[in-house]
Image (cartoon, grey):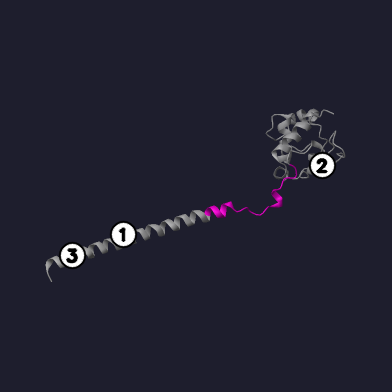
Amino acid sequence: MSDPDRDVRDLRSSRLAKLFLLAGVVLLVLTLLSFWLGSILAQKKSTSQASPLDPAMVPLVTGLEPIPEIFAKAGCPVCHAIPGIPGAEGRVGPKLALGRTGPLRLQDPAYAGQAKTVHEYAIESILSPGAYVVPGFPDRVMPRWYGQKISAGALEKIAAYLESLSE
């Protein structure tokens, strides 16, 4: 065989080797890209699926209800007397006329909460009922889970209503 034939064959082999190398690199890049995209899609799919509804996380009230309905759905009338709320004549907890009693409770040396206003005290009494137990009433009767079941909007409405009561 002559040198020119060998050169042509070497050139063809070299080109073929380069082509196979290029094809291998492209396949490797495509494989890595598909794994990467697959993992991103799997993450999106797993995070976009709605988790089952947990009844414990469904609020008793949203804050969109009228104030008597908020108190009724939250169960407040069972234990508390609340002026202006039909059927709210409970005696297990203190009467909730915080416009009159709230400032006195905040000044009580036994008060261990963080509230500075009657409005804050009303919210704190629901979220952290042990911060202050009104003398003459039992501790640990007010449910500790109310803060998880009453929306922020409902808490605000309750606090505004209770601080307005001076009866």
Relative image position of residue 116 (x, y in whole percent) = 69, 29
State the residue position of label 1.
22
Q: Magenta part of the protein: which range?
A: 43-61
Q: Amino acid at mark 2?
A: Ala
Residue 67 in view (yes/no): yes
Residue where numbered disc 3 is placed: 8
Q: Nearer the viewer, mark 1 or mark 2?
A: 1
Instruction: Tell me the residue that label 2 is attached to.
Output: 72
Secondary structure category for the residue under label 3: helix
Residue 68 got which mark?
none
**Relative to 82, does residue 52 appear above or below in the rendering?**
below
Count residues near mark 3 (Cα–Cα under 10 Å), then give few for <14, some for 14-19, many for 20+: few
Residue 162 appears in which quarter of the rendering? top right
The image quadrant of residue 126 is top right
Three-letter amino acid code of the residue under disc 3: Val
- Labels 3 and 1: the sequence-earlier one: 3
Q: CA distance from mark 1 to mark 2?
A: 74 Å
Q: Residue at x 54, y 52 (%)?
A: 44
